Image (cartoon, helix red, strand yellow):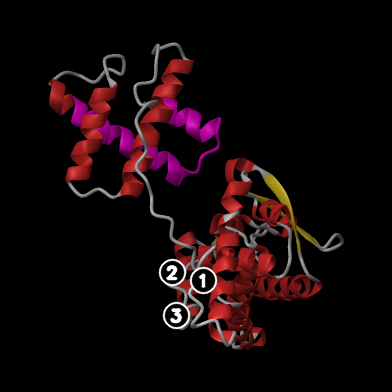
Amino acid sequence: MHDFLTYLQYELYRSDHTVEAYRRDLQQFIDFHTSQTHLPFEAAPVTTADIRRWIAALASEGTGAASLRRKTQSLRAYFKFLCRRKELKCNPAADITLAKLPKPLPDFVRDPDMEALLDSIDPSAGIEAARDHLILHLLYATGLRRSELLQLTDASINPGLGSLRVVGKGRKERVVPLATELLDEIARFQTMRDDRWPHLQPPRPLIATSHGAMSAANIEVIIKRLLKNENAGRKSPHTLRHTFATSMLNGGAELNSVRAILGHSSLATTQIYTHLQTTDLRRIYSSAHPRGLTNPDSESD
């Protein structure tokens, strides 16, 4: 297992969080398998039936579909790795059907509410207020992931081109455009940051604390606090990523352009936001058109 985890981290550039999730899943299966066979674990004797028994046991204990799906994918990736190294002839997890997931629409905040929220924070009221405003503005205006925001440094910003260089999943780089207003806000915050923490060494993290880049947990706390009065069910940095995508598409942006800015590898991932548009149109029609509330076809495709 150690070689597989090393492969994930250093060849596929998976995050520490992802590698740890794979490790837990594999260890859980190993523990289950050894409890069934009463023998030291070996990958070669594992069968598809063994894996199905494990998944069934987890399901009977109440493990959710998302977790079952991830655990199956962890085993599939592990055995595929062993096949590539010629340690196995076939992948026993290849034919395991993945648990089906419900497809809820992502939470997002409507544009007028976002604008009102940004207006409610005075960036000149101190470095904490300036930081909160910049975090909110950046996530709303660029659709960055939380991890991408935390990795930003001064070197990521190109004021001349009006752009941001972002390192996303799999260490893939992309360029995200920045509006002049946001560039100006970044420059003002950098000055405040450098006055407060002049000891930070370059390349200085954009969203900084006295010890360096802010932690992911602190970003979550800030966003949850800022969004506490909004209607979105989930209040997280990813909610603002959904908000950005929804705003772009509602404003007429092409789906492929939004995909490129978000850093999605597949257009199918971005297409969920088209469902948001359809839902919004139906809501507007039902409330605004004189026949909208009584037309039996108003909710049909």
Q: Earlier in the sequence, mark 2 or mark 1?
A: 2
Q: Nearer the viewer, mark 2 or mark 1?
A: 1
Classify 239 as above or below 38: below
Q: Callout 1: helix, strand or loop?
A: loop
Classify 116 as above or below 145: below
**C-alpha distance separating marks 3 and 1:** 36 Å
Residue 126 on image: x %, y %: 61, 84
Q: Nearer the viewer, mark 3 or mark 2?
A: 2
Which numbered tag is attached to residue 297?
1
Q: Which residues are magenta?
A: 4-33
Q: Residue at x 76, y 71 (%)?
A: 187
**C-alpha distance separating marks 3 and 2:** 10 Å
Question: Residue 173 vs residue 242: left or right?
Answer: right
Question: Based on the displayed image, in which of its 4 quarters is residue 262 positioned?
Answer: bottom right
Q: Amino acid at mark 3?
A: Lys
Q: Residue at x 40, y 11 (%)?
A: 89
Q: Amino acid at mark 1?
A: Asp
Which numbered tag is attached to residue 41?
none
Which numbered tag is attached to residue 234?
2
Q: Nearer the viewer, residue 14 or 142?
A: 142
Q: Earlier in the sequence, mark 3 or mark 2?
A: 3
Q: Nearer the viewer, residue 98 or 76?
A: 98
Q: Residue at x 60, y 54 (%)?
A: 271
Q: Are marks 3 and 1 in contact (CB under 8 Å)?
A: no
Main secondary structure along the magenta-highlighted residues: helix
Residue 86 on image: x %, y %: 45, 11
Give the quadrant of the C terminus. Answer: bottom right
